[in-house]
Amino acid sequence: MIYPHYALEVEDLTVSFDGFKAVNGVNLYVSKGELRVVIGPNGAGKTTLLDLICGRTRATSGTISFMEHRLTRMPEQKIVQAGVVRKFQTPSIYPKLTVLENLEVSFPRGRGAFGSIFFRRTSDVVDRIHQVAKEVYLDQLLDEEGEKLSHGQKQWLEIGMLLIADPQLLLLDEPVAGMSVREREQTAELLRRICQGRSAVVIEHDMNFVRKIADKVTVMHQGKVLAEGPMDQVENDPRVIEVYLGH
Amino acid sequence: MSIYRNLLGGRSGSVGLVVLTIFLVFVLPLSLDAFRLNMVGKYLSLAFVAIGLVMCWGHGGILSLGQGLFWGLGGYCMAAFLKLEAAASIATEAGSDQIKALSTVGLPDFMDWNQITELPWFWYPFKSLPATLALIIIVPTVFAYIIGTAMFKRRVAGVYFAIITQALCWAMEILFVTRQGWTGGINGITDLRTMLGWDIRSDSAQRILYFATVAGLIGCILLGRWLLNTKYGRLLMAVRDMEDRVRFSGYDVANLKTFIFCLAAAISAVGGALYVLNVGFMSPKLVTIEPSIYMVIFCAVGGRMSLIGAVYGTLAVCFGRTFFSEQFPALWYFLMGMVFILVTMVFPDGLAGIVNRWGPWLWQRCARLWTRPAKPAAVPAAVDGGTP
């Protein structure tokens, strides 16, 4: 069955590691332009769910579709080329490259070995890098090496590296972990801005942050979806309070 | 301007390259006798492998302990051509003792000793020099492509990859040793004399071959500089530091890795071919694990990020080996081990790291002494560090 109004459709998704079902029969439908937040206690299967969508882990059963693409068996780089990008929990940037080079390497052109050798830093590339750097508050730091950035700036840089590919679906694993209050506010603003016309699935623990950005919230517990809906409804769900929010 | 920046590596890069060229083209040939110069030529043909390793290991993070395999394949290809020519020229010297000892005239002697009466099919291309030159590059590259694709697509990396390359290298040695009739066995391919009628054993030929080796080496350094300055070069470092990030930015990481592995193999093979021309023989003992590990040490001592450092590292270790193994044969291996430990623990960037760190300081010191009589307070601009 096809639901054309959904961007991402995850159906009956299960992954079993030696009998342990980290994700167990999960269904998830994310609309175009929707920002979905997934919350839940540690070990609920949130990160595994993102791993499954982006192809890092392969599903035992179930299907994942994005737009017209069936992601379940696609190689990772093809999933990215289909418009699905992933940000990791610990900021994954290239420490020895400058901010500009980090963004350039993520620019979606010259992706083969030969293509990248003959890739030229033309003016459209430079313009796009400056534009993205400005969006993620790093336009003053273009020549700084990645490893010299603060933790929060690394998180932004990684978001910028996703953004430069102009993705359709962003998978963000704890984008504000380790950020200061001010940085969190900036990131919330950033996410709301970049998700215009794109879909996103965000994992987050900070409830204030979730309240600021979420269109809809999915609560996971022990590999299953426990509850789903708008934030105020989920917050008052006794089962959710029992397993997660009460702690 | 872009050639200056990308090919020569800007100011510090060109200074390093000019110094190296002067050292190899003028200082060594003018100060060493023919025997020692030939020895340097031999060492420099090993430096090709170290340059390949700088790209593949230093920049790409792919540690191969079996580069001797590719170096050896290049060497065997060259040796096969020279051997056929030597066999043909013996055949024309009718009446010589050597020809009386052979039952099949015109065949390499070791084939004759192994009762092979017809040239094996894969030896035919080595009758032609252009085909040989092409095969010197093609055979190791295809080999590296197969290994690379098989390993990298399956995400074999790090120590596992290193061990597998080492095993392959050993397997290749056994193959070369056991297929005596095809490869000359444990003796290798010896008694190589001429290339298209040009006697490669004479002093003048050895001198010309030395300069050919230097030219090839500088060419490979320039090629490496250019490559590492492209987006591919930056991607390579990205793969080394954060492989998953590259994969999830839409790249096929296995392809990127295979490419540099093949290039390193091709460069090594050129060195192997030049080695054979410099020394006049090829032996399976050069293809095996021990030389391959030496090659990694050359690269580590020189500084695994520095293409130029690889050359100095090779020369330093080789001369050290010659000197110490003559003076203190028993101590040599311990010394070598100590050097390797010292380099990895105290100077992770090798000789190049030392030069980059202390070079500017030394330069300032010298320049200050120089300018003191005229302008005591002048501080000249330092050579900026970082030779890629």
Image (cartoon, grey):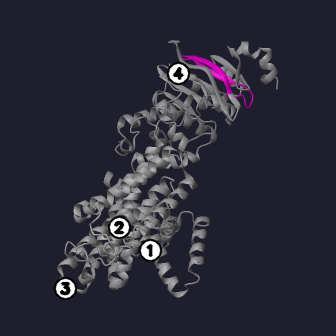
Tell me the residue that label 2 is attached to.
B182
> Disc number at residue B95?
3
Position of residue A57 measured from the top left corner of the image (x, y, whole percent): 59, 34
Q: Chain of mark 2?
A: B
The answer to which of marks 2 and 1 sits earlier in the sequence is 2
Q: Are marks 4 and 3 on the same chain?
A: no
Tell me the residue that label 1 is attached to.
B315
Q: Chain of mark 1?
A: B
At label 4, the amino acid type is Ser
The answer to which of marks 1 and 3 sits earlier in the sequence is 3
Q: CA distance from mark 2 to mark 1?
A: 33 Å
> Disc number at residue A29?
none
At label 2, the amino acid type is Trp
Q: Which residues are magenta?
A: A23-45
> Disc number at residue A65?
4
Q: CA distance from mark 3 to mark 2?
A: 26 Å
The answer to whether one can see residue B215 in this image is: no
